[in-house]
Amino acid sequence: MMEKPNLSFIIEIAGDDEAFQNSILEIIKTEFREEVNLFKTNFSLKKYKEAAHNVHKIKHKIGLLGLEKALIKASEFEKALKIGNTTLHHSFLEILNKIHVFLYP
């Protein structure tokens, strides 16, 4: 069974403060879209070190959305990209897609 994005970590951070939960979620939604676009641009231009930096930033969102296995996979992809290895690209895109469906239903 594939893990699904969830808000449990955000709720843990924000407690019962729904306004705070929503503000965290809004920041994630805004930054995620920008960071993914930047990642895709850098990757398509074969700027793998820059793409690795983008993956690093995206990893924070992956963690906040409770995706532990995806976080490990993203870390592996980040390391691989730094040496020009792109084999985990498809797996990373699957993670991004899963988060995209969750954030922008």
Image (cartoon, rainbow, N blue to C red):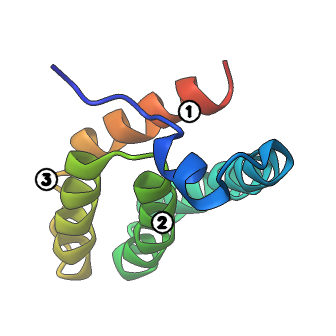
For marks 1 and 2, give the CA distance. 15 Å
Number of numbered discs: 3
Q: Give the number of the mark in front: 3 or 2.
A: 2
Helix, strand or loop at label 3? It is loop
Q: Which mark is residue 27?
A: none
Q: Residue 59 at what x, y percent from top left?
A: 41, 63
What percent of the width, then of the height, locates residue 27?
A: 76, 57
Residue at x-position 19% and y-position 55%: 73
Give x and y (percent) for residue 31.
Answer: 70, 59
Circle 1 SS class: helix
Q: Nearest to the eye among marks 3 and 1: give it.
A: 1
Q: Residue at 38% across / 67% down in the picture?
A: 46
Mark 2 residue crowding within 10 angstroms, few (<14) / some (14–19) / many (20+): few
Under mark 2, the amino acid is His
Coordinates of residue 56 in the picture (x, y in percent): 41, 73
Asked if the residue at tag 2 contacts the one at tag 1, i.e. Cβ–Cβ closer than 8 Å, the answer is: no
Label 2: element kind = helix
Q: Is residue 86 left or right of residue 30?
A: left
Q: Residue at x 17, y 81 (%)?
A: 83
Is tag 1's residue or tag 2's residue first in the polypeptide sequence? 2
Residue under label 3 = 87
Distance Cα–Cα, label 3 vs label 2: 22 Å
Mark 1 residue type: His
Above or below, 19 against 3 in this view is below
What amino acid is found at the position of numbered circle 3 in the picture?
A: Thr
Mark before the other along the chain sequence, 3 or 1: 3
Instruction: Inspect this view and state whether residue 91 appears.
Output: yes
Residue nearer the viewer, 90 or 9 = 9
Residue that sits furthest to the right in the current view: 19
> Residue farthest to the front?
16
Report the residue marked by disc 2.
60
Residue 100 has which mark? 1
